[in-house]
Image (cartoon, grey):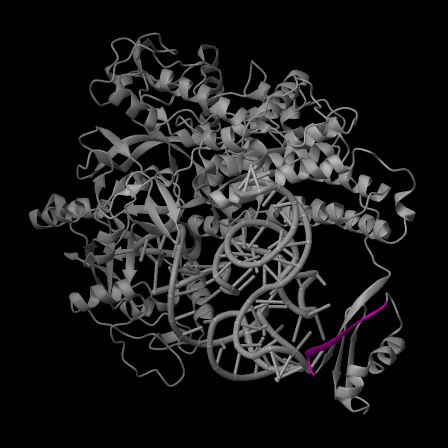
Amino acid sequence: MTAEADTGASAAAGTESRFDPAQADGRWQARWDAEQTFRADSSSPKPKTMVLEMFPYPSGRIHMGHVRNYTMGDVLARARRMQGHAVLHPMGWDAFGMPAENAAMERKVHPGDWTRANIAAMRAQLKRLGLAIDWSREFATCDPEYYGHEQALFLDLFEAGLVDRRDAWVNWDPVDNTVLANEQVIDGRGWRSGAPVERRKLTQWFLKITAFADELAADLASLDQWPDKVRLMQENWIGKSRGLRFTFAVDAPPSGVPASLDVFTTRPDTLFGASFAAVAIDHPLAATVAAGSPQAQAFIADCRATGTAASEIETAEKKGFDTGLSVVHPLDASRRLPVFIANFVLMDYGTGAIFGCPAHDQRDLDFARKYMLPVPRVVALPGEEQTPIGDEAYTGPGRIINSQFLDGLEVEAAKAEVIARAEAQGWGQGTTVFRLRDWGVSRQRYWGTPIPIIHCEACGAVPVPKADLPVVLPEDVTFDKPGKLLDIHPTWKHVPCPKCGKPAVRETDTLDTFVDSSWYFIRFASQPADRPFDRAEAESWLPVAQYIGGVEHAILHLLYSRFFTRALAHMGQIGITEPFKGLFTQGMVTHETYRSAAGEWLEPGAVRKQGDALVEVATGAPVDLGRIEKMSKSKKNVVDPDAILDRYGADAARWFMLSDSPPERDLQWSLAGIEGAARFVQRLWRVALLAKDPATGDPGSEPGAGEALTRLTHKAIDGITNDIDKLQFNKAVARAYELSNAIEKAAPSVARTEAAHTLLRLVAPMVPHVAEEAWAMLGQPGLIADAPWPVADPALLVDDEVTYAVQVNGKLRETVVLPKGLPRAEVEAAVMALPRIQELTAGAPPKKLIVVPDRLVNIVP
RNA sequence: GCCCCCGUGGCGGAAUUGGUAGACGCGUCCGACUCAAAAUCGGAUGUCGAAAGGCUUGCCGGUUCGAGUCCGGCCGGGGGUACCA
């Protein structure tokens, strides 16, 4: 593509036969900027729509995944504007987090400087895409203004009893001296240091997400514009289970040992199948036993040493330590069950203790076999009552056996019966247990929101007075040694206690960055200086009509945001409980991978096609084509958006992102694809040129080809409008091609001129620069971004003739064009009169004749 | 292991939700324009067959007048998740 010398800076270089993005893109972007075209007006009387894409982490450069994500949202935002909505389409930066600290350590730059430089670079890149964003609302979560408001919200949660401080087991990296998230532990080792991760008990701040577990699960049903997949993942994550919580009496407890042991089960129906009880290694009872038993201590230490990696857990053998204690069976006081400390019992689910029913639980069975415990069957299908349990526990349906008063009951009835009896006799209670755990938000990091708490020896944990917010991170820190910089800093943490005025210290942990992203959408909607948000203004935009992002956030971010919004509603700060009405999870951008003969990854630019083979550009050496994978630096299959924008322009990049692949699926980047998209942008320009000399007359009444084109145009309006509503951009693209094809083939007419104008408006959200350029070239007033969206005439959507498919025995034999809405009898007559049908039926009357009006006739001879 | 999703031409993918499979794009081939190239334009393109016609939506079965679409069972690919009692 050669940038031909332009005749000048005129917006509508009408005689140009080519559209030149290098010259036009920036010009239109500047114009939108100057006119504040996409500024969101909170006081607008128009219907309000907030379109949001998950805001980026400022890693330094945007990648194609960003381009795809933001293009999709942009199409929707622009279409809604044209459809008469007041639209809020904001952009900001999820700017706290570890990469900035890593960069600081590696390059000796301050995380803030690094982050802000990245933001500047990425903002410039995003602006080149021509996104319809209200940049006046931009912020970064590392702005003290933003995190100061976040600290205020934290204090509100604290006051409302939704914040807790307690001991918790964490993954501790002894080299980096920090807590690691579960995702950062790979095969039991810290992902950066490679050091074996220790389990350590630390005092941590928690947000009480479990207070809303039931609501968070139940209200998933109301999110009918979310992908089923995401709702299901959240449901599984919350993990609601109905069951029985009950108390075992400890048989003759030695001194110091509690007299009872609480357990939880979802299978109270199998209680007569119990053959042991077990507690987690972290259970208080285990600690009590260990206090008097070196062997128990050794066992617990041994279990703790086992890694937490999935692979290790999967292969880990069931192990137990017999405490020598026993408990009394609650339904049969004559029975005793031995109590073990077992490695497969989890402290943080249920009560941290179980009863073991080997016949009907696989883990219990593995354990029982190892320790030669009995395996009594208590559930069986008819006829299988005597079938012994082998190596597989039976977890299916059936009737209860060997269980006294439960015998003969179905599983569900037996559960209810045991729960009722436990409640009546006072040793247990039906209850609901969640897998979801409270959200530990303490991070031993510098680059995050300081937790606004001051620890005073006399007064305990004291909230920072709101007047003293924000608690600002100190800038003067160095990164030569790992560890908690806020703790090491000579002065920062030392402050007087707000209550008693005595010397005290600040909390030196910072908040998990997921807290930052749990309310940013509210701040986008409303950003007063003196408080986190204005309720009325926020509610005027929220919930987000359409949220778009990667499925990798299906649980964490989306669940935390739902919780945070709900917590704000609980405190009376906002009137919505669900932040995102519509959710869309888009696919990744992938690319072929290339490997040299030596097995090294090659960049796409270093490879060219030679005949059917691939060779290295530099050496001509053969290249192996690898798998198609997500673009990643390690595989070198990355295509840089800037280079694409330089060469093809924003519209081609946007069009390609929307073409071909359904948005929820992966999109394979290819040279052919971007070139095809660039070709379409030029074609669109030529289509617009066709409309330059408008004919006169009434397009609706033009006979023949003109009328057909008008009908097609209105079908395109209808189709593309629906496609964009459903985010099915690939279909909208296909329809735009169809209309372009038809316009190019049509003879000059009013209908053709009209069709071209309509097409421009329909594709304007997708390829806004060429659309503006063509709009101006055609002498249309104002910006196409402000033009009203075309409206389909319903009368033109239906044809007066339809093509019937004529089947014999379900096989297509003939087609026939008949007037639309023809009565059934006439359709039958017309079809039976067809020579081909006469031939096939030999004139005999059919046994059966199915007529689908205006569509198809099936003859069963 | 459990849960979910997906298998349609050489490729990406359409298919009004049970009604003419393969829209649209890419690629390929033929042709036009050109001194030539690029760009552009016209045509062909699931498969077998000269044609008539047959076959065809991962495989096997079922329901139905009719199945890419619904049901059952396999095979293959992808994702999520896990000692959750």
Q: Is residue A812 magenta?
A: yes
Q: Quadrant of residue A858?
A: bottom right
Q: Position of residue A490 (x, y in %)?
A: 24, 9
Residue A573 seen? no
Q: In front: A246, or A303?
A: A303
- Magenta extent: A809-818
Q: In front: A447, or A502?
A: A447
What residue is drawn where x is 40% and y is 73%?
Answer: A406
Residue A15 seen? yes
- Of all residues, the one furthest to the left in this rendering is A294
Q: Quadrant of residue A472?
A: top left
On screen, A96 above or below A827? above
Q: In front: A297, or A698?
A: A698
Q: Position of residue A333 (x, y in %)?
A: 28, 66
Position of residue B59 in the picture relative to residue A678 (left or right): left
Q: Which quarter of the rendering shows the C terminus of chain A?
A: bottom right
On screen, A61 above or below B59? above
Q: Quadrant of residue A394?
A: bottom left
**Predominant SS along the magenta part:** strand
